[in-house]
Image (cartoon, rainbow, N blue to C red):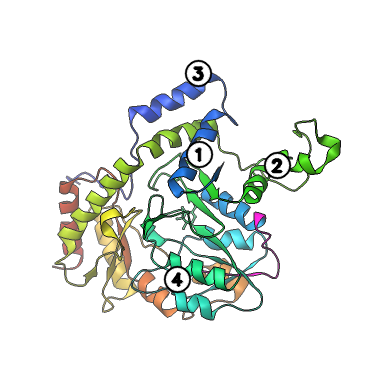
Amino acid sequence: MSREEIPLSSPDITEAEIQAVVSVLRSGRLSIGPRLEAFEAAVAQQAGRKYGVGVNSGTSGLHLCVKALGIGEGDEVITTPFSFVATTNCLLFERAKPVFVDIDPDSYNMDAAAVEAAITPRTKAILPVEIFGNPAHFDEYERIAKTRSLLLIEDCCEALGAVLNGRQAGNFGDCGVFAFYPNKQITTGEGGLIVTDSREIRDLCISMRNQGRATETDSKDDPRRSESSGWLSHPRLGYNYRMSELSAAVGEVQISRLSELLQKRRRAAQMYDDALADVEGVHLPPMIERDTAAWFVYVIRLADSFTQDDRDAIISSLRRSGIGCREYFVPIHTQPYITELLGTKAGDFPTTERVAARTIALPFFADLSPDQVRQVKEALLEALGR
Ligand SMILES: *Cc1c(COP(=O)(O)O)cnc(C)c1O
């Protein structure tokens, strides 16, 4: 291979993040400390929320939100089959029932009319995802939740910095969850963060991320412990979902660079938009408010005349040319463990399946170069047989 391989994603880490980690190591305070509090405050502020609760992954954050909202066995939660499995798994952890609805082909987010139609007397919540960072329809989901008295958890794990009508991702509904795996807009290595305006949700999440330990709120309700810190008092079942100071320190620097990182990602997306606009049979990603968008990945979709096998052959060809790429996503309702558990099957959500069978995520990261975009286009044209 003469050309250098182009990865699917690549984190943008500077000397500042490295120094932040070194400082934490020198401080001796490696967990539950000031870096976490500062990072929580910064992310909450970004989302226009009162509180932030850092955890060790986006999945953990979603799980704690489900628990904090009291969603459990017998409750139906309307969600999208076109997402990463964590969106559904957090419901299964608590034996709640995911009720999938099909997506809108023009945004890849849940069709709002389909959400409304899926409501039953057992529906307790809506769990939408800004897929690929696209915040389309979130105002509609919020309106539906309000008028039908449903809870709303925003899986904004792909959408830090996304804006809909001037409102930030993470600002919709009862609570939202961001994630910081290395391919996200900002990274902490591994990590997640819950944002909310509710003191009650915040306190429950803080307690449950740390083995269900008592918080100030618990102590207030229990006169026996009014003086003690409650460190060894566990009023509820909890987990070890804590985020370390090392991760939080990286996150603090990363979020201070958010506008720079989003700007670089918009520039990368614009280069692809320009390069691929005239490639026949390729649909560009559906992103609203493109000038201010928070791109997570850049996912093209092949025209309906291509089959899933065609798409898979194109992915193989791109990989042979050293281009990192992937199908995004395999529909959740067709995953083996889901079909076994919920009885869903291929054919249930035709729009999701039609889109998912034809998507290709291209290499996408802040420092993508014009030359790399040219290489991707060349390899794509070759894979398409042109
Ligand atoms: C990244 C992501 C998550 C969380 O992933 P973790 O690996 O647990 O941090 C959840 N939902 C969606 C849609 C995601 O893209």
Give me the C-alpha separation between circle 2 and circle 3: 27 Å
Q: Is mark 2 within 8 Å of ligand 1?
A: no
> Callout 2: 10 Å neighbours few (<14), some, many (20+)?
some
Classify mark 4: helix, strand or loop.
loop
Residue 80 included in the magenta stretch of the image: yes
**Range shown magenta:** 68-81
**Which of disc 3 and disc 1 is earlier in sequence?**
3
- Pointer 2: what residue? 211
Question: Mark 1 vs ligand 1: CB under 8 Å?
Answer: no
Q: For residue 91, what is the image quadrant?
A: bottom right
Residue 325, magenta (yes or no): no
**Total label count?**
4
Camera-nearest label, 1 or 4 = 1
**Residue depicted at x 25% and y 56%:** 291
On the rendered image, what quadrant is the C terminus found in? bottom left
Identify which residue, 188 or 304, lies in the foreground: 188
Which mark identifies residue 110?
A: 4
**N-terminal label among 2 and 3:** 3
Cα separation, mark 1 vs mark 3, equals 23 Å
Quarter of image, res 258? top left
State the residue in front, 203 or 279.
203
- Residue 26 has which mark? 3
* Residue that numbered label 1 is attached to: 41
